[in-house]
Amino acid sequence: MSDTMLDLRDVIVVGGGPVGLTAALWLADGGASVTVVESQTAPGDLPRAISIADETFRIMDRLGICDELKAETLLDTGSKYFGLNDRLLAASKPLPSRTGHPAKSQFDQPVLEGLLWDRAVTHPRIDFRAGMLAVAVSQGAERVVVEVRAPGDDDAPSERIQAKFLIGADGGKSFVRTAIGTRLVGSTQQERWIVVDLLNVATPRGPYAEFHGNGERPYVLVPGVKNRLRLEFMLFDGEDGDAMCAPDRIIGLCEPIQPGVRPEDIRRAVVYVAHQRVAEHYRRGRAFLIGDAAHLMPPFSGQGLNAGLRDASNIAWKLLDVLAGRGTDALLDSYESERRTHGAKMVTVSRRTGAVVMAIGATKTRLRDAAFRAVSVVPRINDYLRNMRFITPPHYADGVAAPASSPKMPLAGVIGRPLGQPTVTFADGTTGGLDRALGGDWALVQIGDGAGIDARGGYWSGLGARHVRVLPAGSGIPAPAEQDDVVTVVETADTVVSLCGEARAAGAGAVALLARPDKYVAAVISPGDEDRVIAALRAYEAPLLVTSKEEA
């Protein structure tokens, strides 16, 4: 055994899939030293996840690969649900996203994995241990030690690596999860499904995933870009999974839906059984679980990978703040309370969506179809289904956030939710999303003039907050030399999201929104409300600097 015990890293990430690499890159871009331990020697080439959410694009934009990913993605898609005799039961599409990106899209996972891998292996602050397996984990009060070796040979020499923190992103069979003494709780569905990914499919299709519950063999159809198509079929009891993956059987399954499939068009065929499980704990001491190591969910709502990437961004910014000396242990505890709640909710949504699709037999499917038709005439339920409101973004108002001073406080409803991203004009005359002005850390977003908050000193300076002023469309914008420490931008006339318009409609007057590094709103701050907000945040963020008011 060899030791690198003298080299104390900031974070070890076990697992170099898309979730682990997202966490590693976020941390390394923020200045942390990171070691990635991954058993494979190349990025994954299997198209596992296929649905991507707006927040995932926002995360990838921060990492610098959003445009390349979008070029390989079918953007702005919806879902259609069919019943007996292929009768359309419901068509749904998410409402336009407030994040500045399409709410739902279909992508190719190997493209994402390749982009993340290429960035990670060349990052100066990432020590990428490809072809290495974690075989032991121990932790004490100040550090975590991970023993690694080459996979497949128990007699191969091992090495110990130490870090201040450990992230387990090593999938559903997570070694880290077992090593830190937690387990998945939940159940496994009885039905088996076969996933078929096809190439060279020239048949034109609309931008919708299709869920066909015909009462016989339910199936799912998901189009992609560049003539890609995914088909998923339920398998029946007695059907041999290996035999059903043979090319001739795959071609037979596809023929009624996609005729003319050739063996060379079959990119992948695999049988899976969906799990609906959540880890008992996302944190144990200095170790954290993210992605499939923390939760497993059925694929029917396309939330598994998206939930994992939210995990990655959530824990990454919190670890950076702790490493910077301002984040508290309560900030680290908030990772589990924020992410486990939403992860469990997405597991439930995915399970319920699957139950609709998987109905078998004439009686069950007729009852399901009748229920769909009955509720579709109720406006609120129809809106709920048609706009996919059942897939809700996280809401962190009970997490790292300062509660509203009263329920009637203007803009109180945005606390704990993603910050809207208007299209803005910058001082150099270019236009783009607001995130470009916010940077990668905390930000005080002053809406209009006169919020009366100075981010240059005291608590906000200790937090590393950037001060950004957003002015309504038509306003003049100072030249860069005149902006001092405040970055001023102006909303464009055609922006889909208008923070200035929303503040005006709410009667908010002079107000600032405090955005966390993951672009969730931590507080709404009105003139004279600053001390209350700071007092609420100090449990999570305790920089050494304090405001002069507090010193007095």
Image (cartoon, rainbow, N blue to C red):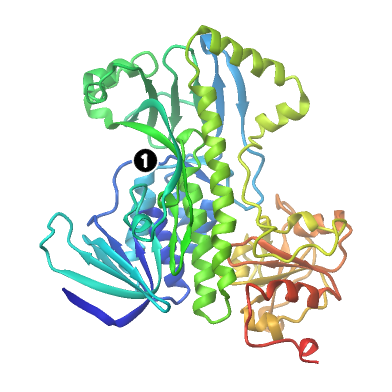
State whether residue 518 is above or below residue 51: below
Residue 164 image position (x, y, % from top left): 40, 76
Q: Nearer the viewer, residue 10 or 384?
A: 10
Q: Which corner quadrant of the image does residue 239 belong to?
A: top left
Q: Position of residue 199 (x, y in %)?
A: 32, 32
Identified at 44% across, 19% down, the residue is: 218
In the image, is 51 to the left or to the right of 369?
A: left
Q: Residue 474's spot in the image, x, y percent?
A: 79, 62
What amino acid is at disc 1?
Arg
User: Tag 1: Cα neighbours inside 10 Å, few (<14), some, or many (≥20)?
Assistant: some
Q: Quadrant of the C terminus?
A: bottom right
Question: SS at mark 1?
Answer: loop
Residue at the front extreme of this rendering = 181
Residue at the spot 52% in from the left edge and 55% down from the top edge: 310
Residue lying farthest to the left in this orientation: 155
Q: How many marks do you count on the picture?
A: 1
Q: Quadrant of the N terminus?
A: bottom left
Query: What residue appears at the point 33 percent right and 15 percent down from the top-left corner?
Result: 255
| Residue 38 lies in quadrant | bottom left
The residue singled out by tag 1 in the image is 48
**Where is residue 5 drawn, in percent x and y?**
27, 80
